Image: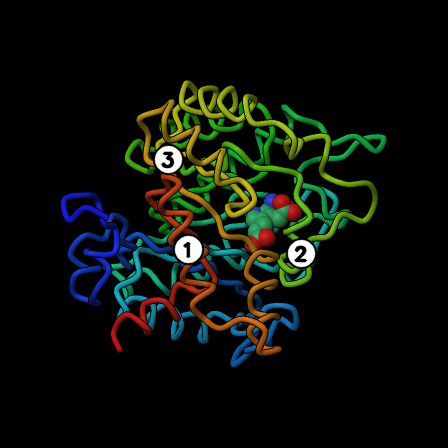
Amino acid sequence: MEDSIYRGRRLRGSASLRRLVRETNLPTGQLVLPLFVEPGEGVRKPVPSMPGVFRTSVDELVRDALEAQELGLGGIMLFGIPETKDDRGSGAWAADGIVQKALGALKSETPDLVLITDVCLCEYTSHGHCGLVENGVVLNDPTCELLAETAVSHARAGADIVAPSDMMDGRVRAIREALDASGFQQTPILSYAVKYASAFYGPFREAADSTPSFGDRKGYQMDPANAEEALREAFADLDEGADILMVKPALAYLDVIRRVREHTYAPIAAYHVSGEYAAIMAAIERGWLDQRAMLEALISIRRAGADVIVSYWAREFARSRLE
Ligand code: PBG
């Protein structure tokens, strides 16, 4: 071998050299931690399929959020589990709903965290679908109106960003118009623009108690086989006023994240979802993998082109960073 030839190993010889030429980093300020909140006091219930994830009451949620703030995380994503459900999901937009209460409690405590709320009906409807159901079909346009009402009520309660995750057509426009009409022109919309009908949401549905009681979500969420369609969805949401585009799940869709990155100029978020987290955690618990696998997964999402990463491991990541 000639001395002048390229030798990749020259820059791999020490940790400091490797750090010097590292292409991808994961700033904690761009990590978002999902948190589940339910009624009560002093509640902290572990989610069996998601080690390290809990359903908590508002008081405990505030503790978790304060910790997230201390660790320098970018934000939290709130999911509510209401006391009661009905066929319209009215708990979603109730002024005294669980997410609204949580926002009230958090607002003055966590000024450095971006408070993002999940805007969807599936945790609030008795049938578990993301919208109004008539004759077994999820209605699109009437659902958009309810989502808009939900988004406004979140903004009113103190949400910094609203994040519709329902996949109805036209909901970003409906939400933008409603927010503007209510004086919330400055509230950004993080749209779950590219959300697949994925088997990787299983543990979340257990945590949020939102499994559909009949059928599935294939009539509104995307077919996992489609990537071109992701761009149509992304452009549609940008046209309607989305500020940040989310791709979800993340690991099984790294190509889609990259595609959306290359074809749009909006900030991109990616959600490393419950099943993706659970799979790695289960392997760690069995001793089949170690924690570096989670780091590798998160960095791959970043490398694919995501700016914001939603991860159940966000706190662990920030802690391991501080060590
Ligand atoms: C609500 C919603 C879901 C997730 C986020 N928002 C579940 C679903 O669409 O069934 C999944 C998040 C995760 O799996 O971590 N529509």
Q: Quadrant of residue 182?
A: top left
Residue drawn at x 83%, y 44% is 214
Q: What is the count of numbered marks?
A: 3
- Is ligand 1 closer than 8 angstroms to the Cβ of mark 2? yes
What's the CA distance linking mark 2 and mark 3?
24 Å
Front one among 166 and 254: 254
Which residue corresponds to mark 2?
Answer: 205
Front one among 110 and 145: 110
What's the CA distance linking mark 1 and mark 2?
22 Å
Disc 2 crowd, CA 10 A, few/some/many (<14, 14-19, 20+): some
- In percent of width and height, residue 222 lies at 63, 31
Mark toward the start of the polypeptide (1 vs 2): 2
Q: Secondary structure at mark 3?
A: strand
Question: As drawn, which residue projects farthest toward the bottom?
Answer: 42
Which residue corresponds to mark 1?
Answer: 298
- In percent of width and height, residue 23 lies at 24, 48
Front one among 25 and 188: 25
Residue drawn at x 39%, y 32% is 179
User: Residue type at mark 3?
Assistant: Ile
Q: Quadrant of residue 286?
A: bottom right
> Which mark is in front, 3 or 1?
1
> Which mark is in front, 1 or 2?
1
- Contact, mark 3 vs mark 1 (Cβ under 8 Å): no
User: Residue type at mark 1?
Assistant: Leu
Which residue corresponds to mark 3?
Answer: 244
Mark toward the start of the polypeptide (3 vs 1): 3
